Amino acid sequence: MNALISPGEARWRQRFAEDSVAALDAALTGRVSLGRYDRARPAEALVRMLSVEEIALADPAMQAWLEQRLGKPLPKDLSPKRYADALVEAFRAIQLLPLPATRNWCADRHAELRAWLRGFCLGSSRDPEAALLVVLAHQQRDRRLLFMWREVIRRGRPVEHVRLALMGLRLMPADDQGAVERGLPRVLLRGLLDYGETLVKQGDKKGKPWLEELDFLAAVYPMSKEIWSRRFREVLQAREVAKDVHNWLDSRFSTAKQAHQKPSKGVLTAPHVDDMEPLLLRMHKDFPGTRPALTALLDYHRRYAQDSGDSYYLVRAFCRLGDQLLSRDPLWARELAHEAARWEPSYSHAWSLLARALEAEGDWRRSEAVYWHARRRFPHDARRHTQLGHALLLHGQEALGEMVFRQATRLFPDNPVTWSELGHSLRVTGQYEQAVNVYKETQQGNFHRDHIIANALTDTLLDLNRPDDAEAALQWAEQVVPDDNKNQQILAQSRRRLEMLKKGTPSPPRQLQAPKETAGGDLRALADITGIDLSHAPLLGRAGLWRRQGHIEQAGLALAALQDGSAKLIEQGLLLSATDWQAAVNWFDDCWENYAGDGALRVHRLRAKSRAGETVDWSWEKNHYPELLPVIVTEEQGRPPRYQDIADPGEEQKQALWFNDLAGEQKSELRDWAEEDFLTARQVA
């Protein structure tokens, strides 16, 4: 056998015996001769070269090779294409060789790996994330990846990833003990329907890619049309889908409801969204006594979601209960929020609940990171801005909190909450006159009937010991405050304060109560739902906030404390653009290949070139990053694209609609903010 080993192969095997990680790196990156296997792809070459004993060494070596690179940019001695190829070959080798430890590590770290690999994808032929998905689909021992497959499907693109996710559902074991699935998995049907819903939200009216997947599955599972129809009806009885998806499905299999049809044996019925309400009423009177019933209902939600792949009811029930648990059991609330975010990362309420639960536990470090992350991921949701600002205010970062609120009033000028929160922040920090000005501006503008602002103006004038003005404001409040117990009690309190002020005994202004802060937990414990290191989120958020306010030096100091990553590279470029777009172009030209597959980074680079007066070709970005088209079209045409109204838009569509409203404004500053926030949201999603 040794006589058949070429000199190049012999040298590589000797190097593998001495330093297996370095030898694997040389083989994967093509920086060494493999003798007679030089023309083979690295993964196939490894399959042919490695003996049984060497494969045992290759397992920890491959894991170490990936661990050394995870989260880091392009190696300086490789081109983007060569590195993308090396990553693809690494996962192909993991798929082809028996490397169980590395496979398990990939499954455990899939969220981080996918977020990192996305920065090196150069199209379908050089897609490391797709290569990872192939490994994960074929090496499942339980159902822990169900969350991930559903997330990939709900993204809806690229279509190659969706197909791999559907394959992952098809190959997933029937239970967590690894039992083989017999027949057509119910989660696969729900996944296919979810894909259809995503296509509808993206504007697809014909459903050609969806029908192709349905026809493929019909060939894989050869059953009569009657059986296919019955299986789909069972899934649809639990939760309906968009009319267009129904029409596509009916073009293949009739799903008309049949009154006599009963669910198949062993199929769990869908819980109802209102099942939680009676228990919540009991919980307020007897929390310990109600806890077992709550736990049982949550477990049923979990079993149903695991069995059906339908997490709609679970996520909303968990968040509904979590909101009520914040003051009673914040740890339980945090666990529910984390689980809800794992099932549906695009559901913003889950992130809000997670941040508030961590804050209630005293874990401000992690809470602040989640608040900032939610602001970056859901910039179209005014509540993510106001909750962040309020939390910063409570925890002694008054100036930052005020900046958050001021920017929120620019981004959401028609939202009264942003204005009332800005006024509140000024009031509790002793800036009473400025608070009065904000409240009066809103009173004279679009919010003359807003009772919260009316009450706030009254109380602020009472803080300033101005009885005549306070009485006039109180009369306004009495006209607009709703006639319910809670609001009438607030109004009565203002009346008492006014009477005390007139008698010469004013009540002291309300002071902020600093919440408790304890030692923070490990941010890495959130990596399964974020895929990224959240420790950078506060620094990135502050840098952007200060940059937009013109505090360039402070923004630079925040960035200097950050670890390298594509988000940091983008913010550094934007910081340069605040004074010189050509300097930003030079920066992006020097660094973009570090993450050549990161769509947001590429678009920021071309955007800077366009602003600097260069002619830009957007064709590659248009083809490879359809989710970024709103910004690309706006830069290319000078105005945002028009989108048709969607009956039930997803988060991506809500962001696009918000972007269109803001980017269509005449003020260039708002257009810039909209583009920056939209690209950030797509990058971290």
Image: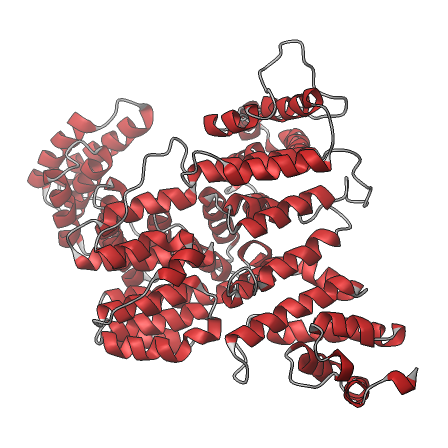
Quarter of the figure with the N terminus? bottom right
Q: Closer to the camera, 466 or 241? A: 241
Q: Give coordinates of residue 25: x percent, y percent.
A: 67, 80
Q: Is residue 188 left or right of residue 679?
A: right
Percent position of residue 26, x then y: 68, 83
119, 491: nearer the viewer = 119
- Which quarter of the figure has residue 610? bottom left
Q: What colour scheme governs how the chains and residues are painted in the rendered image of this protein?
A: secondary structure
Residue depicted at x 75% and y 76%: 61
- The outermost residue toward the right is 1
Q: Which image quadrant is residue 20 in?
A: bottom right
Q: Does 440 sit above or below residue 283?
A: below
Q: Is residue 190 left or right of residue 507?
A: right
Q: Is residue 144 above or below residue 119?
A: above
Residue 338: image x %, image y %? 57, 48
Q: Quadrant of residue 11?
A: bottom right
Q: Residue at x 56, y 27 (%)?
A: 249
Q: Is residue 536 left or right of residue 260?
A: left
Residue 267 in picture, x, y percent from top left:
72, 25
Total marks shown come to 0
- Can the viewer see residue 315 in this picture? no
Q: Residue furthest top?
A: 260
- Residue at far left of view: 468
Residue at (53%, 24%) from the top-left corner? 274
Q: Residue at x 55, y 34 (%)?
A: 312
> Which is more toward the observer, 330 or 304?
304
Q: Is residue 460 visible?
A: yes
